[in-house]
Amino acid sequence: MGSVLVNENPPVAADLIYVLGGDVGGGRILRGAELSREGYARTVLVGNGEQDYGYLESDLAIAFAARHGYDPSLFVAERGFANSTVDEARRVVPDFRRMGAHRILLVTTEWHSARAGRVFRRTAPDLEFYVVGVDDRDWHHGNWWIDREGRKRFVLEALRTIADFLRI
């Protein structure tokens, strides 16, 4: 059942890597940095979920990546923040265009990959999006039913997917 939430692409050469906000574990930012290091794109734009204790997630994520050996100059921090994937796409797509990006690698968690791809493609059908998924500790490489946190991830993302289909 969890496979309906996952729709990933192999990475391709792109104009930009965009790391979606909402990752508290650091997997997304490290995967985005790794993709840049592997030559898929030179710039990693880092999104924000919500602001926590006066700090933007993008600033915290970039510092985290730097502590893991990635050059901070690789990253561009988004300054605004969003409460949903739809809000994030609406906010950041104009930045993609301003930066001259046509082909974008979206980096998000596996369980969020199908919905994120649909939302960004719907928001900007003129751009090419390739979604690169990252496992998280609660997803267990698709074995989400193993523990309570994995089951919560599945149920919440399934509800968000239904809400997205209904546009609510």
Image (tube, grey):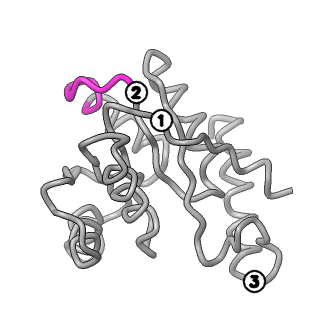
Q: CA distance from mark 2 to mark 3?
A: 37 Å
Horizontally, residue 3 falls left or right of residue 161, namely: right
Q: Are marks 2 and 1 in contact (CB under 8 Å)?
A: yes
Cα separation between marks 3 and 1: 35 Å
Q: Residues within 10 Å of mark 2 (few under 14, many from 20)?
A: some
In the visual, does 38 lie left or right of 109? left
Three-letter code for the amino acid on which mark 2 is drawn: Arg
Name the residue at the left extreme.
Answer: 73
In the image, which residues are magenta? 95-103
Residue 3 position within the rendered picture, expressed as x and y whole percent measured from the top left:
79, 52
Q: Position of residue 41 (x, y in %)?
A: 32, 40
Give the residue number, with chain letter if any, for mark 1.
12
Closer to the chain start, of discs 2 and 1, is 1
Return the residue found at the far top.
Answer: 126
Residue at screen point 77% across, 71% down: 144
Q: CA distance from mark 2 to mark 1?
A: 9 Å
Question: In the structure shown, which secondary structural element does the residue marked by tag 1 occupy?
Answer: loop
Q: Secondary structure at mark 3?
A: helix
Of marks 2 and 1, the one in the foreground = 1
- Which one is earlier in the sequence, the residue at label 2 or at label 3? 2
Query: Mark 1 Cα within 10 Å, few/some/many (few <14, many 20+)?
Result: some
Q: Per the image, is 100 magenta?
A: yes
Q: Which quarter of the rendered picture does the C terminus lie within?
A: top right
Q: Residue at x 70, y 50 (%)?
A: 6
Q: According to the image, label 2 marks what residue? A: 103
What residue is disc 3 on?
148
